[in-house]
Image (cartoon, coloured by chain):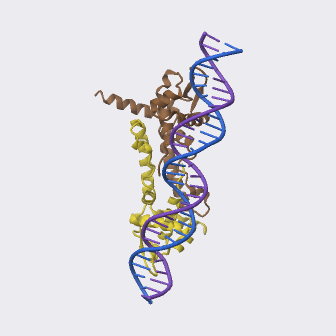
Chain colours: A yellow, B brown, C blue, D purple
Amino acid sequence: MKLSVKSDYAARAVIGLAKHYPTGAALKVEDLAAESSTPANYLVQILIELKSRHIVKSIRGKEGGYLLARPPAEISLGDVLRCVHGRVFDPPALHDAHCPAELRAAWKKLQTALDETADGITFQKLLDEGADKAKMYYI
Amino acid sequence: MKLSVKSDYAARAVIGLAKHYPTGAALKVEDLAAESSTPANYLVQILIELKSRHIVKSIRGKEGGYLLARPPAEISLGDVLRCVHGRVFDPPALHDAHCPAELRAAWKKLQTALDETADGITFQKLLDEGADKAKMYYI
DNA sequence: GTCACTTTTGACGGAGAGCTTCACGTGCGG
DNA sequence: CCGCACGTGAAGCTCTCCGTCAAAAGTGAC
C-alpha cells in the first residue's frame, strides 16, 4: 500500500512554510518548490487544495506568495493528509454491503488508529525534532 | 487514500476459511468465492499469494481446495495485509533522499502505529466478534 | 490407464488514478 | 497600463488495479 508522493510533497511544503512562519513574510511558489525539491507546477495544485482547507493562505501580486493560515502547533499531519486525499485509509468495505460486519469493524479500528496518530503529530513537533537533530551535531 | 479491494477480498477469504477451520475439510475456490461474494477468478490469484506466505495451504485434485495453514489465532490482519500489498503504508519518502529527516520519522511513526494495530487483530478475535454479534440477536 | 475434478500459472486488456507539464485567466502593486 | 505572481483547467503519460480467460499440471476414483 503505497502512499502517494502528493502527500509527501504537501507535508514538505507545510514544513517549509512552517520554518518561515516566524518571519511573517509570504513565500513564492518557486522558492518553496526549490526548498522542498518538489516540481513547482505540481506544487501549485497542492497548495490550492491546502488553501481551500484553510491550512495555508495566499497573497497575490508582487511580493505575493503563500504562508500558513495558522501557527504550526495547530496544524497536524492528519489535517494535511485528509486534505490531499479524502479520508485516510478508506476501505472499500464501507461501501460494500457484502462485507461482514466484523471485518468492517476491524477496518474502522485501523482507520481510527491511523487518524489518532496522524492528528497527534503537529508541525510544531516536527520543527522541534528537526531543531533537536541539528543541535545534536554540535554535541 | 483508498485501500484496495484486494485486501478486502483477502480478509474475507481468510474469514471464510477460518469459519470452516474446525471441520478440517478443504474449501473449493468457487464455494469460498460464493460465500464471501468475491469474483472467483480474481480470488484465485489472491489465494496463491496467501499460500506463498504460508497463510493458507491447498490440496489438489478431487476433494481438494483451500484451508488455513495455521489456527485463526495465529493469523493477524497485518499478515494478510502485508501479503497482499508489500509493506503497509509505504511512504515514497523512504526512497527519496530529498525528504527531510523529521518527516521521514513522522511517516515511520504512522507506519508502526498501523502495523501494531493490524498485528493485534487476529482472525480468532474477528470470529469471536462475529459470534458475539450473532448471539446478541437472541437476547 | 483414464477420467473428472481441482489447483496452478501466465497472459491479456480495459479502467482509472497519479504525476507532470503547459497555457491561459485573474488579481495586485507600481 | 504593465509586470508579477497566484489561480484554474486541460492535456498527456505512465502505472497499478481489477477482472477474465485459457492452458498446464497434479490428484483421487473407477
Q: Residue at x 52, y 21 (%)?
A: B25
Q: Position of residue B132 (x, y in %)?
A: 36, 31
Across and down, in percent, residue A39 comes to 56, 67
Residue ID at (48%, 35%): B38
Instruction: Please indicate, yes or no, whether residue B17 appears anywhere in the rendered image.
Output: no
Tell which of A76 and A137 is nearer to you: A76
Nearer-the-camera pick, C9 or A133: C9
Kindly give the residue lying farthest to the left in the view shown. B139
The residue at the point 55 percent across, 54 percent down is: B91
Q: Is residue B138 above or below residue D16?
A: above
Picture quarter with the C terminus of chain A: bottom right
Measured as percent of width and height from the top left, residue C20 is found at 57, 64
Res A110 → quadrant:
top left
Report the residue at 49% width, 29% height from top: B32
Q: For the image shown, how many numbered marks are present on the structure?
A: 0
Q: Is residue B62 left or right of residue B114?
A: right
**Res A16 visible:** yes
**Residue A62 location (% of width, % of height):** 46, 82
